[in-house]
Amino acid sequence: MATPTPRHPHGPRRLGPWPPATLLGSLEPRIRETLLSLGTFSQVVSGETLIMEGDPRTKDVFLIVQGYMKVVSNSADGKVVLLAIRSDGDLVGELASLDGSPRVASVVTVGPCFVRKISQRDFLGFLADHPDVALAVNANVVGKLRHATWHRIEFGTSPMPVRVARVLIYLAQRYGETTAEGVLIGSLTQPELAAMIGAREHSVHKILRSMRERQVIATRYGRVLILDSAALYTDAGISEIPPEYGVWPSSGPQSEEN
Amino acid sequence: MDGLDPVRRLCVAMGAETPAQGDASGPLVDLAEGASIAAGLDQVTFQVLPAGILLVLNSGVNEPRVVADLTRELHNGLWRRNRRGAGTARLRCRIAFHQGLVRLTDEGFEGQAVTVVGDLCASEHLHAELGASPRSDLAMIISGQLLDELAYPESADLHRGQFRPVTVALTAAMPGRSLPAYVYALGG
């Protein structure tokens, strides 16, 4: 029989800094620790639905401590549309918690995740007691709106290879892991990538194959490794993601406190 | 959603050979953080244990790379710390690797993998390996099955010949039972 390890005051914690573009990465360490002490810590297996689109009952929010999640919605013709990817340091579920409306989209885990589940009551109470965090959550929601705007404008009117390049740049900037070979983007299947940019899977497959042949990217074990960032930006037809679309944090990363 | 569902993960336990100095978790966390960044690892979660710290890796990591790179970077980090550490005691560490099912409860990480890696890190064989290598700052132990899977040719950095086979009594995980493992003192 396993013996439980003693509980740390705030349970398990992330080793290293939080991605600066995320909610947790934007908070002062002391405030972040307090927020992370709310609610309960859970491990969620791959493919679980944390939040169900249209659900009027649950109003909890989830802080992603480790792992990837996809935000999806069902279109009128029955297809599943990938709206966004969320990962370490991101908050999901805050819209229903803030305005009390039914869930606007579903959130499904992509691989096992660690999350902090916080009730609506605790979350709203914390925001009331910490106006700076309320502002950060506000900025986070605005950032999501800006990204959704960028997604709609840039992805809706650009040729498909440009859309693929831009979404790879976005994912690399926000969640990419820098390795000796390049920037590694976590688990993201080709069907999910196709759904995210509103393209057919075989079209995305052809575009990725072309990128592989030109050694712009490599794909391995369901992950994408960006080998040549300059070539990817050329494919995307941009030199940067415009700052007005909220991919970048408004300020630098906060120092980490153990 | 059932938060008690187990997930197979790579677990790493770290301990310091500095019993007289009390809680060594702070320096261990600093070392582990520096090593994980240098090794290019993200999505690592840690928890403080009574005698060290536990690192839990995200599912699906490249295990040979994590074991080889994390160990190498910890060794480098210890060398830098001890080299410049005028006025501070030399820090010598033990590190253990095992993988298996991990649960997360209100008490923290649980599961056989967690307790087994703790037993490995606390084993007399690992203490003895470090004790017998006075020049070494880091001794590692890895469960037999894990090294058998990860060693050369799977990884060019992990060779069975470097290690000494031992049998570890699982005093906390499974009293009365034991586990084959391998130990090695880096730079010893």
Image: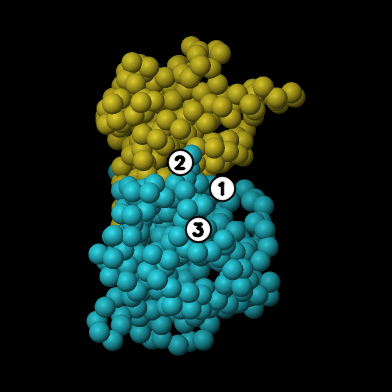
Chain colours: A cyan, B yellow
| Image quadrant assignment for residue B155 | top left
**Numbered disc 3: secondary structure:** helix
Select label 2 or label 1 by which is in front: 2
Depicted B175 relative to depicted A48: above or below: above
Residue B19: numbered disc: none
Q: The residue marked by circle 2 belongs to what chain?
A: A
Depicted A110 relative to depicted A246: above or below: above
| Image quadrant assignment for residue B161 | top left
- Answer with left or right where residue B95 lies relative to residue A207: right
**Numbered disc 1: secondary structure:** loop
At a point 51% along the width and 52% down the height, the residue shown is A230
Residue A181: numbered disc: 2
| Image quadrant assignment for residue A129 | bottom right
Q: Which residue is mark 1?
A: A16
Disc 3 with disc 2 on a shared chain: yes
Q: The residue marked by circle 3 belongs to what chain?
A: A
Q: Distance of mark 2 from mark 1, alpha carbons?
A: 21 Å
Give the mark nearer the N terminus: 2 vs 1.
Answer: 1
Residue B112 image offset from top left, x and y in percent:
32, 42
Q: Are marks 3 and 1 in contact (CB under 8 Å)?
A: no
Q: Is residue B94 visible?
A: yes
Q: Distance of mark 3 from mark 2, alpha carbons?
A: 17 Å
At a point 50% along the width and 64% down the height, the residue shown is A237
Q: Quadrant of the N terminus of chain A?
A: top left
Q: Which amino acid type corresponds to the residue marked 1 in the rendered image?
A: Gly
- Answer with left or right where residue A178 lies relative to residue A206: right
- Answer with left or right where residue A169 lies relative to residue B11: right
Q: Which amino acid type corresponds to the residue marked 2 in the rendered image?
A: Glu
Q: Which residue is mark 3?
A: A233
